[in-house]
Image (cartoon, helix red, strand yellow):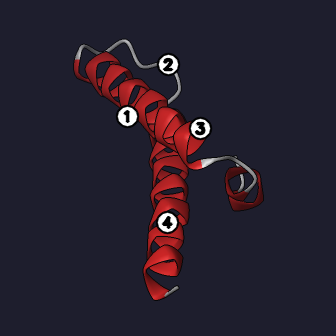
């Protein structure tokens, strides 16, 4: 997911996306811990997407506080 896609979403949709990504990250960590992880690069991708979503939300909060 790209930052452009995230910027087109509403705050509520972004928060829902964040929750979904955190759940996915947890599930991937559990798979990795139990040795069932077939594709290790997925954890990296989820972490990057989480960071993007958090960044967009933070930008919006800072922009709202400036006004």
Q: Earlier in the sequence, mark 4 or mark 1?
A: 1
Find the distance from the CA under tag 2 to the CA under tag 3: 30 Å
Question: Looking at the image, is mark 1 or mark 2 nearer the viewer?
Answer: 1
Find the distance from the CA under tag 2 to the CA under tag 4: 29 Å
Find the distance from the CA under tag 1 to the CA under tag 3: 14 Å
Q: Residue at x 41, y 32 (%)?
A: 19
Q: In terms of secondary structure, where does tag 1 sit?
A: helix
Find the distance from the CA under tag 1 to the CA under tag 2: 19 Å
Q: In terms of secondary structure, where does tag 3 sit?
A: helix
Q: In terms of secondary structure, where does tag 4 sit?
A: helix
> For mark 2, does the 10 Å Cα neighbourhood hold few (<14), some (14 to 19), or many (20 or more) residues?
few
The residue beneath circle 4 is 55
| Front one among 22 and 15 | 15
Is 5 rendered above or below residue 18? below
Residue 36 image offset from top left, x and y in percent:
37, 12
Question: Circles 4 and 1: CB distance less than 8 Å?
Answer: no
The residue beneath circle 3 is 13
Q: Earlier in the sequence, mark 2 or mark 4?
A: 2
In this view, which residue lies farthest toward the left?
33
The residue beneath circle 2 is 38
Q: Residue at x 54, y 40 (%)?
A: 12
Q: Earlier in the sequence, mark 3 or mark 4?
A: 3
Q: Earlier in the sequence, mark 1 or mark 3?
A: 3
The residue beneath circle 1 is 22
Q: Earlier in the sequence, mark 1 or mark 2?
A: 1
């Amino acid at each position: 997911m790209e930052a452009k896609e995230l910027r087109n979403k509403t705050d509520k949709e972004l928060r829902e996306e964040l929750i979904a990504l955190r759940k996915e990250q947890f599930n991937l960590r559990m798979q990795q811990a139990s040795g069932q992880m077939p594709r290790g690069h997925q954890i990296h991708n989820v972490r990057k997407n989480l960071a993007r979503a958090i960044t967009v939300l933070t930008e919006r909060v800072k922009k709202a506080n400036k006004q």
